[in-house]
Amino acid sequence: DFAWQRENNIKVRYKNRARGLHKVLYQCPSCKTEYKMDSGGAQLWCNHCGKRWTMSEYGELQATEGETHFSHIPDWYEWERLQVRAEVEAGVYSLTKQADLRLLPNSKGLVEYGETTFIHDMDGFRLEGIHDGKEYTLYMPAQSLYSCHIEYEYGKYKRDCVDLNTLNDSFWVFPRGDDFSVTKIALATEELFNYKNP
């Protein structure tokens, strides 16, 4: 954990220590734009406004210019949660994406199921599509899911995904494009559950 690392003066000299950090820190605190963050080496930056941060060997962030906003990475993450909570409380949280759907029917690996429409909104999760000529809809109400499993650059697919489970099936949803964040989906799942179950 970053606080422990800092308190114990543990240096991480790995030159790519910030790589992938934009997967978690998906919203820029400077311009508030979502899904335009990127990272590489020891840097994190916003492709929308150009704001940049450097990650120190002690796991702290420092803006290269201007206000840092959050030097402690978990504080940035909690700020993102508050942004999602505000969307939920205003009743406006919604995401609709075309996605590739894979099922995990057994321990042998994922099986292709085709394209699906992936919807995550105030009501919960929905998958809608056609498979073998038949329409299907999977609905998971928001009040029944306190969390969801996400993966970054999963396995051989090298794509971010959401894993939705029933008692009998596991649905691996790989949204298309780059205008989404599985981190936000996970935060929204938690916030929707709390909102629907006061």
Image (tube, helix red, strand yellow):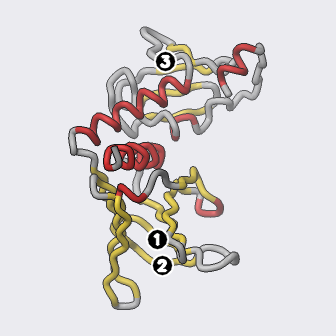
Nearest the viewer among 129 and 153 is 129
> Residue 70 vs residue 158: left or right?
left
Amino acid type, callout 3: Phe
Amino acid type, callout 2: Tyr
Return the mark for residue 70. 3
Which mark is first along the chain, 3 or 2?
Answer: 3
Callout 1 touching callout 2 (CB < 8 Å): yes
Q: Is residue 102 visible?
A: yes
As drawn, the residue found furthest toward the bottom would be 133
State the residue at coordinates (62%, 35%). 19
Say which residue label 1 marks. 101
Mark 2 Cα-neighbour bin, 10 Å: few <14, some 14–19, many ≥20: some
Return the mark for residue 140. none
**Residue 18 percent location from the top left of the image:** 62, 30
As drawn, the residue found furthest toward the front would be 198
> Residue 111 vs residue 127: left or right?
right
Say which residue label 2 marks. 113
**Residue 143 percent location from the top left of the image:** 36, 55
Q: Is residue 97 visible?
A: no
Report helix, strand or loop for mark 3: loop
Separation (CA) of disc 1 from disc 3: 36 Å
**Residue 175 percent location from the top left of the image:** 42, 59
> Residue 152 vs residue 98: left or right?
right
State the residue at coordinates (46%, 51%). 146
State the residue at coordinates (35%, 38%). 84
Callout 2 touching callout 3 (CB < 8 Å): no
Separation (CA) of disc 1 from disc 2: 5 Å
Which mark is first along the chain, 2 or 1?
Answer: 1
State the residue at coordinates (51%, 13%). 64
Report helix, strand or loop for mark 1: strand
- Residue 30 position by quadrant: top left
User: On screen, 141 above or below 114?
Assistant: above
